[in-house]
């Protein structure tokens, strides 16, 4: 497996130089961050990331993420033009040597937490998710203060978007995902790029919006949409672990994991969870067994550490510190 580390570009407090000093590190996971969803990424921006990484002896073979425009998830008539832009990004990234693109299909929100800097007893901080606290919020009424999602929506824009989703239930979202995947596969095969879908995080519906990449049954259904290695999983142990249904060994043996996110969480009864250190004894997931399963099944895709805690006074992008 190839070890990688996330990098957020020029503004990232974790430098490429520091990343290159981590033993065994082969490359970065990055993206063009200043282009809105649905638009084509300039080739110069892609080449710049690649050149900066190469200057530190790091490869740029994994993108996280090329965001999927909401019109595609909603299945609107306008989706085809956004899918064409997506295909163009796949082709451009493939030409630059990118082998894997991570994305998600969560309506409106990406990953959600109730606190990005929960203070632990030892003084470190972690990301946590308190289900009750999130359930008590109503994004349609504005005043939503959740970290981890696109804050560029105005209150009215968000309310209107949520209104549009009223007509999209889980089955409609499956149809729209199938349409999208089938439409982009030819570009992936031409460009030699694997698509790796990130599971929904957390893996259950929030604010009445459907979430479908959540559990083993649905992962199987997803992989069957297009039975090709280019249609793969970004198996995020922390996201899926919260649904208590991780089967890394099975998907790795099938050759359908393109990318691994390794994160440990302490799961609570009510759907809440706290992100913990990676050591198996620190959380609910047996990280040792997960990595062992990958090794034993000959996993040769990309892997990166995911989240963890801020320790030693480090400040930076929540979940993406150096230590
Ligand atoms: C959170 C990340 C996600 C992930 C996207 C992929 O820490 O794992 O934001 O990058 O869901 O599209």
Image: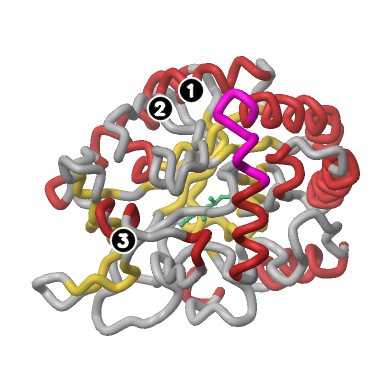
- Inter-mark Cα distance, 3 to 2: 23 Å
Give whichever of 59, 136 is nearer the camera.
136
Circle 3 SS class = loop
| Contact between labelled residues 1 and 2, with CB atoms less than 8 Å apart | yes
State which region is magenta: 164-172
The label on residue 218 is 1
Residue 309, quarter of the rendered image: bottom left
Sequence-wise first label, 3 or 2: 2
Q: Which residue is mark 2?
A: 215
Mark 2 and mark 1: Cα distance apart in space:
5 Å
Looking at the image, the residue that sits furthest to the left is 121
Q: Position of residue 263 (x, y in %)?
A: 34, 50
Q: Where residue 208 sits: x, y (%)?
A: 47, 42
Task: Report crowding for label 3: few under 14, some 14 to 19, many 20 or more residues within 10 A (C-alpha).
Answer: many
Q: Nearer the viewer, mark 3 or mark 2?
A: 2
Q: Left or right: 102 with respect to 278?
A: right
For label 2, the SS is loop
Give the Cα separation between the discs numbered 1 and 3: 27 Å
| Residue 308, numbered circle | 3
The crowding category of the residue bearing disc 2, from other C-alpha atoms within 10 Å (few below 14, some 14 to 19, many at least 20), is many
Left or right, residue 282 beside residue 85: left
- The secondary structure that dominates the magenta segment is helix
């Amino acid at each position: 497996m190839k070890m990688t580390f996330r990098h957020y570009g020029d503004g990232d407090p974790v430098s490429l130089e520091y990343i290159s000093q981590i033993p065994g590190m082969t490359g970065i996971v990055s993206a063009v961050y200043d282009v809105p969803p649905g638009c084509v990424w300039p080739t110069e921006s892609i080449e710049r990331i690649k050149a900066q990484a190469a200057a530190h002896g790091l490869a740029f073979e994994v993108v996280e993420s090329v965001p999927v425009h909401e019109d595609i998830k909603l299945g609107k008539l306008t989706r085809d033009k956004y899918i064409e832009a997506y295909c163009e990004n796949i082709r451009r990234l493939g030409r630059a040597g990118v082998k894997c693109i991570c994305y998600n299909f969560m309506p409106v929100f990406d990953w959600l937490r109730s606190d990005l800097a929960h203070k632990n007893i030892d003084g470190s901080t972690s990301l946590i998710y308190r289900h009750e606290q999130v359930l008590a919020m109503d994004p349609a009424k504005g005043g939503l203060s959740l970290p981890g999602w696109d804050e560029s929506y105005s209150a009215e824009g968000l309310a209107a978007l949520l209104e549009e989703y009223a007509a999209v239930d889980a089955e409609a979202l499956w149809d729209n995902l199938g349409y999208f995947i089938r439409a982009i596969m030819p570009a992936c095969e031409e460009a030699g790029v694997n698509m790796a879908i990130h599971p929904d995080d957390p893996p259950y519906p929030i604010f009445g919006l459907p979430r479908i990449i959540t559990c083993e049954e649905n992962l199987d259904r997803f992989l069957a949409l297009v039975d090709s290695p280019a249609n793969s999983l970004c198996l995020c142990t922390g996201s899926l672990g919260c649904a208590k249904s991780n089967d890394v060994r099975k998907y790795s043996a099938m050759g359908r994991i393109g990318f691994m996110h390794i994160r440990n969480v302490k799961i609570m009864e009510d759907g809440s969870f706290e992100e913990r250190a990676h050591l198996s004894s620190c959380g609910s997931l047996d990280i040792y067994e997960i990595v062992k399963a990958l090794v034993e099944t000959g996993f040769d895709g990309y892997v990166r550490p995911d989240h963890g805690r801020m320790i030693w006074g480090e400040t930076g992008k929540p979940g993406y510190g150096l230590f």
